[in-house]
Amino acid sequence: MSVRCKSALLLGLALVVTAPPAALSHAAIMEAEVTQAIRLHAFYETGEPMSQAQVFIYAPDDPAQVWGQGIADMQGRYEFIPDAIAGRWSVQVRQAGHGVMAHLDIGADAPVMTISSTPDTWAQRALMVALVAWGALGTALFARSRKGKQDASA
């Protein structure tokens, strides 16, 4: 290799090493926007997320019609930005026979004020067990009384 080639190579290498970073790469730009999004996280009482659960959103001005719907992600999370309608928004999350309904009170110039949800609690389960037991007892007593009447008439 000639002295001239070595000098050119060294000069080129020196230019690359000492060049400002902007010359070696392209710029990265990011824009950020602050929103008043509602972030939901639905999970079972065991802590397991309601992965891919159905989400239904109802606006306060027409609570009988679905305002928006979607599917929660694998962690049971879902995000939406409500219209500027003050009042009680309702959100329902359902998956495989399980579900929860939350009510979000949104003010005219404020974000979410309160959240009240109605999950499947132990008290609801106890009430359901008691009602099923009561119904089974009533049915058994009714069947027993009918059997006694049939035996007497025979």
Image (cartoon, rainbow, N blue to C red):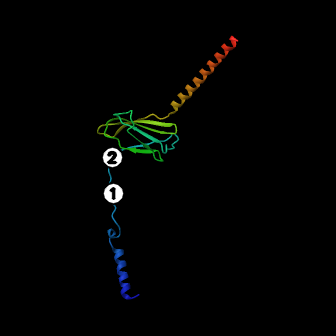
Mark pair 2, 1: CA separation: 16 Å
Residue 54 in the image, given as x and y percentages of width and height: 46, 41
Query: Which residue is situated farthest in the bottom direction here?
Result: 2
Q: Residue 140: which disc? A: none
Please rate how many residues cluster around mark 2, counting C-alpha atoms within 10 Å: few if below 14, some from 14 to 19, many from 20. few
Q: Is residue 148 above or below residue 80?
A: above
Residue 61 in the image, given as x and y percentages of width and height: 33, 34
Query: Which residue is situated farthest in the top direction here?
Result: 153
According to the picture, the residue beneath numbered tag 1 turns out to be 30
Q: Is residue 28 above or below residue 150?
A: below
76 vs 62, nearest the viewer: 62
Residue at the (32%, 68%) spot, across then down:
22
Q: Residue 35: which disc? A: 2
Q: Is residue 55 above or below residue 11?
A: above
Q: Check if mark 2's residue and mark 1's residue have beta carbons within 8 Å.
A: no
- Under mark 2, the amino acid is Thr
Q: Quadrant of the C terminus?
A: top right
- Under mark 1, the amino acid is Met
Residue at the (63%, 21%) spot, across then down:
140
Residue at the (52%, 39%) spot, across then down:
96
Residue 44 in the image, given as x and y percentages of width and height: 50, 40
